[in-house]
Image: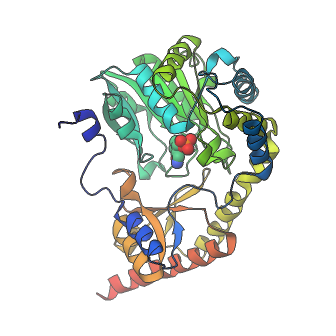
Amino acid sequence: MKLSHRITHLTGGGSDGWDVFYRSRQMISDGIDVTELTIGEHDIRTAPSILATMDAAARGGHTGYASVPGIPSLRDQVAARVQERTGVLTTRDNVVITPGGQAALFAAHAAVCDAGDTALYFDPYYATYPGTIRGVGATARAVQARAENAFQPKAADVDAAAEDAVSLLINTPNNPTGVVYSQDTLKEIAEVCRRRDLWLISDEVYDTQVWEGEHISPRALPAMADRTLVVGSMSKSHAMTGSRCGWIVGPQEAVEHLINLSTHTTYGVPGYIQDAAEYALKQGCDLEQEIAAPFRTRRAVAQQILARQNLLGLVPAQGAMYLMLDVRATGMTGEEFANALLDAHRIAVMPGESFGQAATGHIRVALTVDDTKFAAAMEKLCDFAAQCAAMRRTA
Ligand code: PMP
């Protein structure tokens, strides 16, 4: 039977740099000890107190259909968090709870793109972005955020690609680069959005993981609240990846339609998960900082180790749970380096090529194993790069 073009063409096809990831997963299932610095998942689990709240809520009967927009008290809690951190007036009417940030990204694009519309996103990009856009029937158009600009996107490049586009998707702190967009970058992008009448979909799932500079939500910039949909999630901030709880914050009219979309797609998020999310958010910044702390430490460890060499270039590591390293001085592509590293040392990293074209010749290192193991892996990675470069010189 014929399947829709939309679903069969969701992903790009061809080699997309994920081979090394699947190879490392295969090695692990074959019993080989691999240090996995690939995907963005904490090495800790959800805090016991959050689980206790979830358990009590489920046992207390919150297991039926929950309110589709999200339970009012969680929507209030998200609104309060956003208002406190951005200064933008936000009420529950600006919030819809979704099953994670990914569902929010899909819903946000469904809300602003008609079939055949063009939606912009930056390359390098989080793996699902183009597929999410194609999933709503829109055309995904990449705008390069270049390595020579330390992966800060340029408003002029957005402008050049904006003809006939309806939206722009951004992500700061950024996966995969670890870059935090500066105030100037965001102001200039916001100006293009206003001038070109674009919706801005702002993926802020790493907003609690900022090591340098500050996280600025573009919804707080002048005249942006009416054209910005902010995607948030409990996954990264509270180590709740498996709970599937996130949200969209945006203009009331958009939220009303998004709630209607939820009625026709997800039918909301389990009540006991929402109760746990509300409890977790009520713990405030202290819990968030506690969860972010190991990444901050490992980033510092990596900086110290990398400072002893000058072969691998570190892209400014300002936020999120990743480091992006420039491996071009080894003479290898990111894909070649990642594959060779896996074979030589059983260390798995993601090639930059798996995040588009702009991060070719780079690798992404996730800060997601314990400190000792992480330091050892970074040492080996640097030594390996030096060996590769030396071999190249004598070849
Ligand atoms: N956006 C970015 C940039 C991500 O890295 C991720 C997860 N890795 C998500 C969204 C989706 O996260 P979740 O659905 O778990 O909230």
- The quarter of the picture where residue 69 lies is top right
- The quarter of the picture where residue 333 lies is bottom left
Query: Is 326 rendered above or below residue 154?
Result: below
Specify the quadrant that holds the N terminus. Answer: top left
Q: Residue at x 51, y 25 (%)?
A: 190
Query: Is 62 rendered above or below residue 211?
Result: above
Q: Residue at x 75, y 27 (%)?
A: 77
Query: Is 64 rendered above or below residue 41?
Result: above
Q: Residue at x 44, y 37 (%)?
A: 154
Give percent across and percent down for residue 283.
82, 40
Q: Is residue 170 in view?
A: yes
Q: Is residue 359 in view?
A: no
Q: Which residue of the protein is positioned furthest toward the left in this rendering?
A: 1
Q: Is residue 328 left or right of residue 289?
A: left
Closer-to-camera residue (57/266): 57
Give percent across and percent down for residue 239.
67, 50
Give percent across and percent down for residue 242.
59, 48
Q: Which residue of the protein is positioned furthest toward the bottom in this rendering?
A: 394
Q: Which residue of the protein is positioned furthest toward the top in this rendering?
A: 253
Closer-to-camera residue (217/9): 9
Specify the quadrant that holds the C terminus. Answer: bottom left
Tally the marks.
Answer: 0
Query: Is 387 rendered above or below residue 227?
Result: below
- The quarter of the picture where residue 203 lies is top right
Q: How is the image coloured?
A: rainbow
